[in-house]
Amino acid sequence: MKFASRFLPIATILLGAAFAVSTFAQQPQGPPPGPGGPPPGQFALPEPTNLKVLPKNTNGQQLRDIMQNWAGSLGVHCNTCHTQDTKNLDPNGRPRMNFADDSKPEKNTARLMYTMVQGINKDYIMKLENVEQPVACGTCHRGHLDPEPFVIPKREHGGPPPGAPPAGAPAPQN
């Protein structure tokens, strides 16, 4: 009887672990990897809907990469621009994001800012010689939702900025 009382808790734990592993293994993982499929260990992202400023041929992985870049540049998360869909729950019971919904004004602001950045790069930056990097969200935002105001550093004694040519010197030739 002593053996059974010691074995029962261990058997229960092992059965629970086996059940959890088999349940997880049966979860849909997306299509199997292959030509055009996701790399091993990743799942297929759904095709984007409601694209208004990004190219219509943007796929799910490209859109996720773009959104992660924007979120990092602004120091925000998905819920800044996207609403939760309380009728569509994930396996943990949390609402999934409704990425197609346009009800949050921040989403329209992001579209407007993206269009502005594209215009600045096309109409101005790309026309300059020796430009190494185009303008992007992080150029101004630097990890903050609202860009921090630029404050001109104060100079001691009101002189020219460091590295400026001396007064009366000819302007540098380009």
Image (spheres, grey):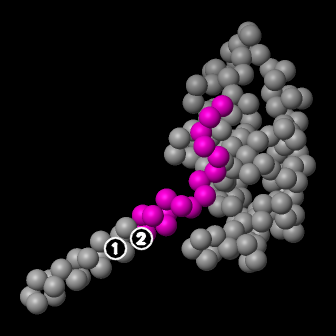
Depth check: give the residue in front, 164 or 121: 121
Depth check: give the residue in front, 41 or 174: 41
Residue 105 percent across, percent down from the top left:
85, 65
Magenta portion: prevailing SS class = loop
Instruction: Write the residue at 54% across / 61% down.
Output: 26
- The answer to whether residue 17 is magenta is no
Point out the residue furthest to the top here: 173
Instruction: Write the residue at 78% across / 60% down.
Output: 99
Residue wearing tag 1? 15
Label 1 amino acid? Leu
Q: Quadrant of the C terminus?
A: top right
Please give the range of residues in magenta. 20-35
Mark yes or no: residue 174 visible: yes
The correct choice, above or below, for 119 with respect to 6 in the image is above
Point out the residue furthest to the front here: 1
Instruction: Write the residue at 87% across / 69% down.
Output: 103
Left or right of residue 105, residue 141 in this image = left
Dot label at residue 19: 2
- The answer to whether residue 34 is magenta is yes
Mark yes or no: residue 151 visible: no
Q: Secondary structure at mark 2?
A: helix
Residue 157 percent across, percent down from the top left:
58, 41
Q: State if disc 1 and disc 2 touch (CB < 8 Å).
A: yes
Q: For residue 135, what is the image quadrant? A: top right
Instruction: Write the residue at 76% across / 77% down.
Output: 87
Q: Quadrant of the N terminus?
A: bottom left
Residue 25 percent across, percent down from the top left:
49, 59
Label 2 amino acid? Phe
